[in-house]
Amino acid sequence: MKVAVLFSPGAGGKIIYNQIGEVLSEKLSNHEVYTHKGYYGMAYLPNAKVLPASIPEDYKTGIRFMTHSLASLGLDLFITVGGDGLAAYVADVLISEKYDIPIMGIGVGTANVGPIVSITPEFLKMLDLEHLKFVNIGAIHVIEGNKHIGYGFNDVVIGNTFLGTINGKIVNISVEAMVKKGEKLVERPAQDIVTEQFTIKKNGKPVKHGIQRPAQIVVSPIEVDNFYGRAITGALCKSVFSSNNAAIALLSHVVVKVEDDDSGIDSFMQVEHMLFGKDDVICISGLSSSGHIVIDGNPYLREENKVTFEYIPKLIRIARPL
């Protein structure tokens, strides 16, 4: 089997990369393994074949370049070692460039909650690469204005911060500081992510909503394999019995954050859900200067007023242990 392995140097759990490299080297000893130089793979996989290429300094551009160069080898499996963000970047390239290569993620990032990142470092020792299950999963396609931004396999969050790791501690990091300067700057999540002109449209028609000024907006695929509805989940439980396998949520309080409070624990939190399916187009406009885009933990500085979401089923193949 021809396998590519790509590490994320900035992932939250990089302290255990050497251990993961040792286990992976053993697991892949009978396979043809490719990676890139430095801390993207060569430092942890001494027996892998390293592609001799100059990697762009910009992180996103570099990941795109490395993914394309590895995928063009005609791979049987693409393994990422990092978090949901690295997996999403790699998957975006595989989808956009039409590479039919299954992807499997080993989670050492900040959250590691998405469907691609299915292997923990602890489970890696028990992994049998000869017995994998391949599943097609869908994602949320995010478009800003008329420009493709990315695919969200876990969630797309509208806000000014994203979860990241600084010195081993999970914190809220500024989207603007990371995108503009490449700096990890701790920042409090903003509550004012929309303006008075905030509008939601489904298939071109405005949709009424009770929470006029949501503190956070989340859009997620909720496929049956990854989500099992209960009545307590309200409208979301209907997704199990229909083709509406994605949802947009307006929240009265910020959920994706480190700071804890009693919202939803000692007091009620307001949440509004609306389901949508593969033929639907959800468009939001009227976001404030704090309303940026975070896709599976990857920050994007929003520049256009209109952001569109589409659910695309069976978008990519992922590999999981049996």
Image (cartoon, helix red, strand yellow):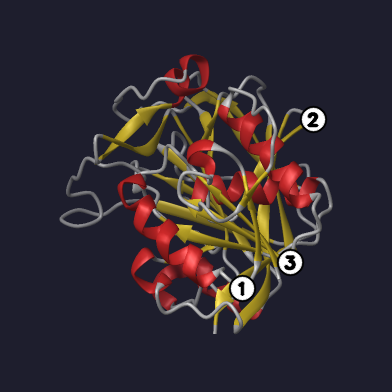
Q: Which amino acid does label 2 sit on?
A: Asn
- Residue with the mark numbered 2: 146
Query: Label 2's element?
Result: loop
Occupied quadrant, residue 192: top left
Query: Label 3's element?
Result: loop
Q: Nearer the viewer, mark 1 or mark 2?
A: 1
- Residue with the mark numbered 1: 30
Q: Residue at x 64, y 25 (%)?
A: 56
Q: Earlier in the sequence, mark 1 or mark 2?
A: 1
Q: Mark 1 and mark 2: span between their CA atoms?
A: 46 Å
Q: Mark 1 and mark 3: span between their CA atoms?
A: 14 Å
Q: In this view, does 33 lie above or below 14?
A: below
Q: Which of marks 1 and 3 is in front?
A: 1
Q: Mark 1 packing: few (<14 Cα in 10 Å), some, or many (20+)?
A: few
Lateral position of residue 148 relative to residue 79, left or right: right
Can see residue 191? no
- Between 280 and 29, the one nearer to me in the picture: 29
- Residue with the mark numbered 3: 76
